[in-house]
Image (tube, helix red, strand yellow):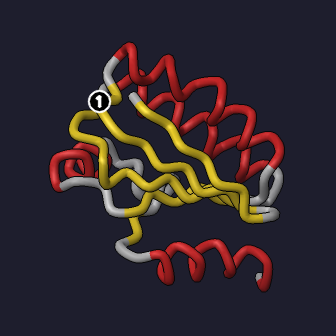
């Protein structure tokens, strides 16, 4: 699992590439928790993720809840069809909204600052 983070002020964009299996989930656990504690918004670019396991869902949910407690939000950008299906089937799309463009991601995060 490769993780590339770019800081955008109160928001961070995180590009993930690889498999979010047990090993991949371990790679993202600390960086996600750290960002969730220090940022207002997280955009996770999931376009390079080919597989997601339940342990990875757990880390995503924990980060989203940490952000939510502080009035922030995490959005998932362009997950593959398989990953999106897992998220939808798991009933997590309210907590982990799926967006299909940078503009949509920024709009989803922007509603926090306005609302």
Q: Residues within 10 Å of mark 1 (few under 14, many from 20)?
A: some
**Image position, residue 69 (x, y; %):** 78, 48
Image quarter of the N terminus: top left
Residue matched to label 1: 19
Q: Quadrant of residue 56?
A: top left
Which residue is drawn at the image coordinates 80% and 62% (left, top)?
10
Location of residue 76 in the rendering, given as x and y in whole percent from the top left corner = 45, 57
Q: Quadrant of the C terminus?
A: bottom right
Q: Nearer the viewer, residue 91 or 10?
A: 10
> Is 5 above or below relative to 9?
above
Q: Is residue 78 left or right of residue 29?
A: left
Q: Indicate whether 24 appears above or below 7.
A: above
In the picture, measured across the screen, residue 8 lies left or right of residue 25, that is right
User: Which residue is pictured at 80% across the width and 40% down the height?
Assistant: 37
Q: Residue at x 23, y 34 (%)?
A: 51
Residue 45, quarter of the rendered image: bottom left
User: Above or below — where is 95 with respect to 33?
Assistant: below
Task: Please give left or right for residue 112 compared with residue 75 in the image.
Answer: right
SS class, disc 1: strand
Residue in view at x 40 percent, y 76 percent: 101
Q: Disc count in the image?
A: 1
Q: Position of residue 89 (x, y in %)?
A: 24, 46
């Amino acid at each position: 699992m490769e993780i590339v983070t770019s800081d955008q002020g109160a928001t961070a964009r995180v590009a993930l590439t690889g498999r979010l299996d047990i090993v991949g989930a371990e790679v993202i656990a600390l960086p996600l928790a750290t960002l969730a504690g220090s940022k207002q918004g997280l955009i996770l670019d999931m376009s390079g993720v080919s597989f997601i396991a339940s342990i990875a869902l757990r880390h995503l949910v924990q980060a989203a809840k940490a952000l939510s407690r502080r009035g922030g939000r995490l959005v998932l950008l362009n997950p593959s069809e398989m990953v999106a299906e897992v998220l939808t089937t798991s009933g997590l799309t309210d907590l982990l909204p799926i967006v299909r463009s940078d503009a949509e991601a920024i709009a989803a995060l922007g509603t926090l600052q306005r609302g």
